[in-house]
Amino acid sequence: MHSFVKNPVTHVTELSPQTLKPLHQTQFGPWRLLPMVSFAFDYWWGNGSVAAYHVTNNVIHALCWLACLWMLWVLLSTPRLVPADRDKRFFGALSVATLWALHPVQTSAVTYVVQRMATLQALFFMAAVAAFIQGRLGVYASRAKAAFWWSLAVLFSLGAFLSKENAAMLPVILGLIEVTFFRPRWWAELPRRFGESLKKPRIVLLVILAGVVGFWVVSSLLDSFSKGYEIRHFTMKERLLTEARVVMRYFFTVLVPDPRALSLEHDVEVSRSLFDPPATVLSLAAIAGLLSASLWTITRWPLISFGLLWFFLNLAIESSVVPLELIFDHRMYLPSVGLILAAFEAVRRVFSKAAGRWTIHEREKIAWSAVAVLSAVLCLMTFVRNEDWETAVNINADAVRKAPNHPRAHANLASALIRAGRYAEAVEAAQKAVEVGRDHFEEHFVAATNLVIGRLYLDGEEKALEEAERLLGTAPKAPDATALPNFLTILATLQTRAERYREAYGSVQKALDVLAKFPRLRSDAPMVYAAMNRLVQAVAEKNEDIDGDGSPDPGELQPTEWIVRKLHDLGDWEGAKRFADTVPASPVAQEVRRVMALAEERNRFQSAQWGYRNYLWKPKGLADVAAGAAYGLHRWHGFAGIEKLGLKLLHVAELRRPDNADVPLLKGWYAFEAGRAQEAVALARQAVALAPQSAKAWIALGFFEQRVGNVERSLAAFQQTLELYPGYPKRQVLQQLMTELHTQLAAQSAEKESAQQANVTATFHARR
């Protein structure tokens, strides 16, 4: 099962507010809370059994079928689509919902436990759409009933938003339904209304304002997304181009069901340009043509157009600029509803024209028979696809066959083979994963871990240790860190058994560094702590210096006390608290707790003061409004005229609150972005003088001093930042920068000493 399911946070033995509260503290925050709650529920009622998770997944899929049936029933009941009788509506809704639910393309979303996030989001999404339409249909009959259904739609919408971020498309879909099925004249009147609106200055102003806000939101999102591409083997532009081909692949996979086209992993060639590969431009043209045709024919063939637009809109988030992986089968779960609806309606129209000579009864028999046969075929295909999921080895071997150049496919197969005890095969699969791996696109440490475990069982500890050190030395420059803590823990354990204690400590420290850099990996922390405990217990009687500080470890301290102090010094307070809880009476543990409590108080203070959130969301007067607006404008510092407007706003804020350190600090950032580093330094010093306890003022001063070349002052400012804000979220990044600055300062000192020595030598020779 996936790491989200294995996350200890979801392993609850009783359902209570205390056990469920941590579920919103995963890497997704509250946005996928409902799936996490469902995982916790499954662990509770199934006692950790995998079968419990699968039962729930299938129940959710059945509920999705009902939600889809409900949504299609009410959609076909809208004024534009009401057929001659109730039976035709039922036939259409039941046929599309059943064909969708039985389609083999849904296997990945339903059988792969963690993709419950996609199925839960689809369940609430379709239920929200159905409730909205139900309320819309009853608005003229009973306002009270309409209000009830719309309240239910809001509740279902909340469920969708708490299941997966794709729910962001829900308002767009609801708007599309409104103008397509309830206000069809809207499309025809759109050009005229738009032209008339442009004649009203108020409307023009609103359009401009909306455009400015929209541009700011989009630019902010793109800036945020761009950081995610640092760990990808493709750029944002390349992903956007590649997704055109991926979307068309989804399109044909839904229309032409074939279990052989489905896989846990896919080899996807990245599109480097419009014509590399040539299918890129063809796919873009096909998508543009389908979208254009949908909009052009939406008043004539509303169901076909709506189905196609549903398909593309619900793929828009995961198939555009968001820095996700390129392709996954489960992404077709919700979008495929629209495509199957469009295909069904198109076939129905063709069949109606071709069967003009048949009686109504004959048409009904043929239609029901055709749907029954197609459902049986799809059911058989889904059964065949599910056989690939029978065991972890089967599904990963299938992925390797279909994606032979995908390193994760081989690495996952190696993991499955290890769990099955097939170590020789696991070593072979892991070696293949290492061979095909490359920067930003590999599972080096997943494969390496399996390779070491395989060697351990096949060849013993000495060979396993040699293999682990070789793999660590040959790792790519930009490896996937997901499995790195596990690998380093195994390496540390092997080094401890080989009595290479200092090297073992180095491996543990590297693992702790990875956990600090990637908080999403914190679920691996207990494993790292256990390796550290084994190491310190092993050297307890030998008093060796494992951390290189010149004194024996653990010295006069008990092993647990030494670990408490060391983890605190390394900045891993979670681990320090965990070990301190095991020795509550220890003076060392009590002192570390006191220091951490003081630091946490500082953290709360600095976190509340950090950034400019209060100015934007809780302004206390004109000065705060001006400062908040200036901060917002600062995000657009690259545009002409923005700086002048921002500085004028800050002048207003300064006149109102001359003692506010954030005003000169923000002025400093304006100057810094404009290249006036000396001015930025002076303004930051002014901010520090006004608020000497402000960590954000000190860190800004550090960056400004670094820009003008004052390395020593920059280091001092950064050090003061960390003292004031011990829990600074990017502490590790700042410490890495400080290490580089120390190296730079040492190089400058050496260069200066060398120059002074040369001057002395030259003077000596001159005097001779």
Image: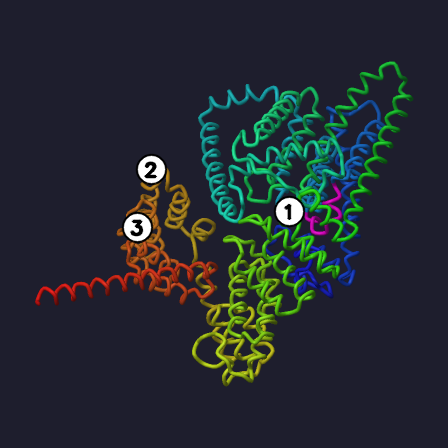
Secondary structure of the residue carrying numbered label 2: loop
Residue 745: image location, x then y, percent: 31, 62
Can the viewer see residue 151?
no
Question: How far apart are the two marked residues, 2 and 3, measured between alpha carbons?
Answer: 22 Å
* Residue 670 in picture, x, y percent from top left: 33, 47
Say whether residue 188 is left or right of residue 706.
right
The dominant secondary structure in magenta is helix
Could you tell me the amino acid type at mark 2? Gly
Of residues 727 and 620, the one drawn nearer to the viewer in this rendering: 727
The residue depicted at 76 percent of the width and 42 percent of the height is 64
Question: Closest to the observer: 451 or 142?
Answer: 451
Q: Secondary structure at mark 3?
A: helix
Tag of residue 164? 1
Magenta region, residue range: 106-117
Q: Earlier in the sequence, mark 1 or mark 2?
A: 1
First in residue order: circle 1 vs circle 3: 1
Which residue is painted at 8% across and 67% down in the image? Answer: 768
Give the label on residue 365, or none.
none
10 Å crowding of disc 3: few (<14), some (14-19), many (20+)? few
Residue behind mark 2 = 641
Three-letter amino acid code at disc 1? Lys
Q: Which mark is residue 655?
A: 3
